[in-house]
Amino acid sequence: MYTQGLDQLGRSELHVPTAETAALEQGFLARVDREEKIEPKDWMPAAYRQTLIRQISQHAHSEIVGMLPEGNWITRAPTLKRKAVLIAKVQDEGGHGAYLYSAAETLGVARSDLIDQLLAGTAKYSSIFNYPTVSWADVGAIGWLVDGAAIMNQIPLCRCSYGPYARAMVRICKEESFHQRQGFEIMLTLARGTREQRAMAQAALDRWWWPSLMMFGPSDVDSKHGAQSTRWKIKRVSNDDLRQKFVDVTVPQADFLGLKVPDPDLAWDAAGQHYRFGTIDWTEFNEVLKGNGPCNHERLAARRRAHEEGAWVREAALAYADKQRNRQASAA
């Protein structure tokens, strides 16, 4: 998902309750089991707080970096309507990042620190955004596949045990559903177009299919902290179950489009009522996470440049806020 790096946590963030916190943790787990939301001022285990900070911040970073692959097609969209829709979508992603940074701040971390970590290259974001968008069809494939995978991941987060995160996800999921439909509509238009347009759609599916499956993170057997996140009800569904659901939903959509999923091992299992699919190249996944993907350096360079060029806006906003506070203090 957008927080694949959670499986890279260090030993310092492993959950090790102490005798002093045993009673508090028992009460905390009882609340979680009763499906009560944990709020910012409630007691929570330090490891729960750190897991949430990392997960929410990685999610926020992914939304912000995720603006880049599609943003560079705004000036090249084929029609004015396509341009307007794409602008709205990219703007939505920026808003999602803002919601999520706000949710992370409720856990006692400064937004500026999180952004500094992203710009320094020490924070993770989803590997999917380190792939290039080489044609207009890639914009459609991102909406259909990437946003489709994101929705599959994020709907369970609407029931996350941490209240601010769960509430932010409700709005985000509603907007992501429109993004997915927009992407599928682009692919449908191309698939029903000329031979060249159909070939463009197929090539985009070929490029984005496997990275989309990687979005769900490592296989459950290799996921180091999935069990603890599930116990805390941060995570509701396992990586492999979400991936399987995505494949089962998406393959019939590809059939409807008249496109072929680039997996020679893909087959319907009548007994299990699921599609069986080939082995994911986890070496590629890990290399991209390490910063060795096709566009890792380009994406961070773009974010750093935007941050530097936007410094005057932040400074002006702070100066205006100070001026307003001074005026209010003088009038009091």
Image (cartoon, rainbow, N blue to C red):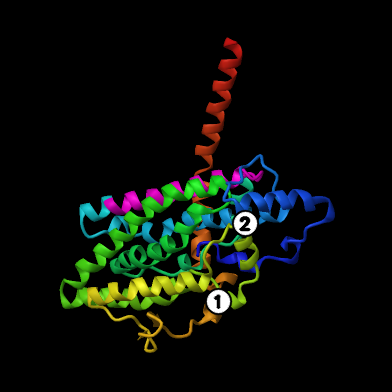
- Residue lying farthest top? 331
Q: Is residue 237 above or below residue 37?
A: below
Identify which amino acid the numbered label 1 is placed on: Ser
- Residue lying farthest bottom? 264
How far is mark 2 from mark 1, CA to CA? Answer: 20 Å
Question: Where does residue 266 sit, x and y in percent of width and height?
Answer: 37, 85
Question: Which residue is under mark 2?
Answer: 54
Question: Which residue is under mark 1?
Answer: 219
The foreground one among 186 and 305 is: 186
How many other residues sit within 10 Å of disc 1, few (<14), some (14-19) or many (≥20)?
Answer: some
Identify which amino acid the numbered label 2 is placed on: Arg
Is disc 2 placed on a helix, strand or loop? helix
2 or 1: tag closer to the N-terminus: 2
Question: Where does residue 228 sit, x and y in percent of width and height?
Answer: 65, 63
What range of the chain is rendered magenta? 85-110
Q: Is residue 278 above or below residue 168?
A: below
How many other residues sit within 10 Å of disc 2, few (<14), some (14-19) or many (≥20)?
Answer: some
- Looking at the image, is mark 2 or mark 1 nearer the viewer? 1
Q: Say if the magenta span includes residue 109.
A: yes
- The disc label shown at residue 186, or none: none
Question: Where does residue 163 sit, x and y in percent of width and height?
Answer: 55, 46
Q: Is residue 77 visible?
A: yes
Quadrant of residue 110 within the rendered picture? top right
The foreground one among 329 and 315 is: 329
Q: Is residue 90 visible?
A: no
Prevailing secondary structure class for the magenta stretch in the rendered image: helix
Residue visible at 58% across and 62% down in the picture: 124
